[in-house]
Amino acid sequence: MENLLTVAEVVELTKLKTPTVRKYVRLELIPFIRLGASIRFRPSEIEAWIEARSHRPDDGEKRSA
């Protein structure tokens, strides 16, 4: 089993602010686990969440301005 991350660790990993991470949890925009009153995150799910939001230029295609 993966070691779960705290809100503070997700803040450090993503460089988001604490209120932003808590807002994403409240709006269910980020994968999380609720353990009683605590919020935890699976590292693999956070990495996949970040990767899913990565924007890469199209391969060889140029956009016209």
Image: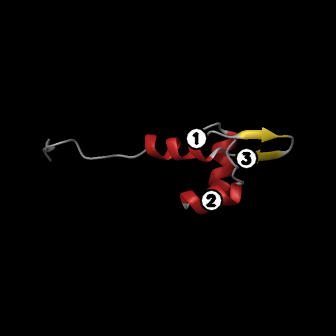
Residue most extreme to the front: 1
Question: Which is more toward the observer, 25 or 34?
Answer: 34
Badge 2 or badge 1: first in the primary sequence? 2
Residue under label 2, please give it: 11
Res 30 quadrant in image = top right
Crowdedness of circle 1 by 10 Å Cα count: few (<14), some, many (20+)? few
Labels 2, 1: front one:
1
Residue at the image position 15 percent from the left and 47 percent from the top: 65
| Residue 6 image offset from top left, x and y in percent | 72, 54
The image position of residue 17, as x and y in percent, is 61, 60
Please say which color scheme the image uses: secondary structure
Q: CA distance from mark 1 to mark 3?
A: 11 Å
Residue designated by label 1: 45
Q: At numbered mark 1, what does the secondary structure look like: helix, strand or loop?
A: helix
- Of residue 8 and residue 16, the one placed in the foreground of this image is 8
Q: Which mark is residue 40?
A: 3
